[in-house]
Amino acid sequence: MAGYQLSVCAEMVFLDLPFIERVKRIHDLGFGVEIWSWENKDIAALAATGARFTSMTGYLSGNLTDDGEIQQLLHSAEASLAVAEHLNCPVLNLHGTGLNDKGLPVKPVEKVTGAMWLKAADTLRCVAQLGERAGRVFTLENLNLPVDHPGTPFALAADTLALVEAVNSPALKMNLDLYHAQIGEGNLIELIRRCGSAIGEIQVADVPGRQQPGTGEINYPAIARALHDMQYQGTVAMEGWASGDSTAALQQFREQFTV
């Protein structure tokens, strides 16, 4: 049996249902639940579902490199920690910069400078300190530039790994998104092995189309075996659209990761 746990992003499946009902449905099917921004959610109602929340967005605004934006990010990270405590959610997710409702960077970046790298590492050290005090983990997610998130700084998994290793805190890990990594970097099994203990969570969807594992080019059963062999104990979360019926998509996800 695999040691990892499966979770599903409620933002992307059962789209015909109200959000609370999506969460309940995912929970009833035996999965953990992930959410994006908590700002537009009924937190008390989410907590009352009894669902096991595995990850949520850990900020509302700001970025890692601009002084004023850094303060926004840190302030909203603190607010997010309070929500995470209410939901008993262990992981809070970050991106290289703030994203708008279409997933595009609020402030696109053409070139990431050395000064930006240093500033981002300093900011993430502050974020990690917040996580350490709260007993929760922030994760930094890789994104892809060609298809979904052009202009995002620190987008590659190699970038997020470098920042996580520079900060070197148990409260800052990678959210290794294999959908984004396949588009941006490829060589996924070696990437997983290289990242190793820096991984705090793995997110999955297939390429092309960002639908459930088993619908595209990624050999997810081989990835599942690699995770099993390296004794990965964390969460594998489907952050993808259902190609058809959501219940069937979640069953296919489970089958792809059954070792």
Image (cartoon, grey):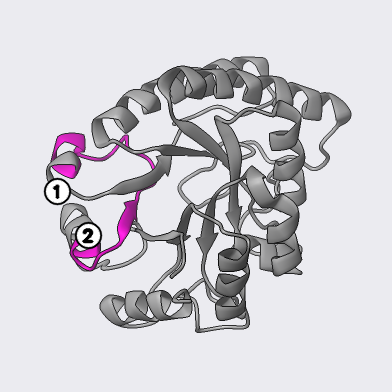
Q: Tell whether 160 sits left or right of 138.
A: right
Residue 98 placed where, x, y %? 56, 36
In the displayed orientation, state which residue is furthest to the right. Answer: 114
Q: Quadrant of residue 206?
A: bottom right
Give the residue drawn at x 58%, y 64%. 227
Residue type at mark 2? His
The image's mark for residue 69 is none
**Quick check: marks 1 and 2 in contact, CB under 8 Å?**
yes
Give the residue drawn at x 25%, y 65%. 30
Residue type at mark 1? Thr
Give the residue drawn at x 76%, y 63%. 185
Quadrant in the picture for the N terminus? bottom left
Q: Determine whether 81 is above or below 146 in the image.
A: above
Q: Determine whether 248 is above or below 24 in the image.
A: below
Q: Which residues are magenta?
A: 25-46
Between 175 and 151, the residue placed more toward the observer is 175
Q: Secondary structure at mark 1?
A: loop
**Does 31 appear in magenta?**
yes
Q: Secondary structure at mark 2?
A: helix
Residue behind mark 1: 49
Residue 132 placed where, x, y %? 50, 21
Residue 217 placed where, x, y %? 62, 83
Can see residue 18? no
Q: Tell whether 196 sits left or right of 2.
A: right
Give the residue drawn at x 45%, y 34%. 58
Mark 2 is surrounded, within 10 Å at the Cα level, by few (under 14), some (14 to 19) or many (20 or more) other residues, namely: many
Disc 1 or 2, which lies upstream in sequence? 2
Between 103 and 84, the residue placed more toward the observer is 84
Residue behind mark 2: 27
